[in-house]
Image: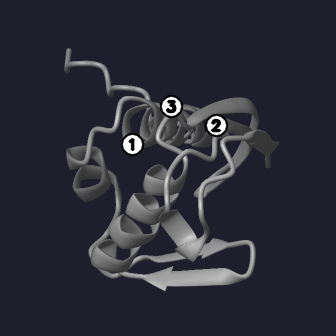
Amino acid sequence: MSDPIPPARTARSSSDEKRRTAIRFFEQVWNTRRDGTIDEVFHPSFTGHGEGVEVIGLGPYKEARGAMLSAFPDLRLTVEDTVADGDHIVLRWNARGTHDGPGFGLEPTHRRVKFR
């Protein structure tokens, strides 16, 4: 008798794994400021889309993140919800912080903000 064939990975387990990776990325990159996770998770030539901005590559992403953390040194992101379907992962999140730094060319207002 031969060994049983291991069950194939299902789309659901693959989606769950990608969802966990996306949540880990938000937690480690933004909340614990672990720079190495950017290199672990993103392809070197990835494209990131944000509100009115597009970054291509790890260097520009790290620069944009640095500007955000400079402006909001206490920034915390919270993942509110996720939807996963195959290779597509969508996260709904919010961010809170205090505008205490000079990032984005604006003088600090020292006001607390919350945004999505």
Judged from the image, the secondary structure of the residue bearing numbered disc 1 is helix
Label 1 sits on what residue type? Val
- Per the rendering, the mark at residue 20 is 3
Label 2 sits on what residue type? Gly
Q: 100 or 85, which lies in front?
A: 100
Of mark 2 and mark 1, the one earlier in the sequence is 1
Provide residue 29's location: percent of width, then percent of height: 39, 42
Q: Nearer the viewer, mark 2 or mark 1?
A: 2
Whether residue 95 sits left or right of residue 22 in the image: it is: right
Image height check: is 20 above or below 102?
above
Per the image, the residue denoted by label 1 is: 29
Of mark 1 and mark 3, the one earlier in the sequence is 3
Label 3 sits on what residue type? Arg
Q: Which image quarter is the N terminus in?
A: top left
Q: CA distance from mark 2 to mark 1?
A: 15 Å
What is the basis of the colouring in this image?
Answer: one colour
Whether residue 75 sits left or right of residue 62 in the image: it is: right
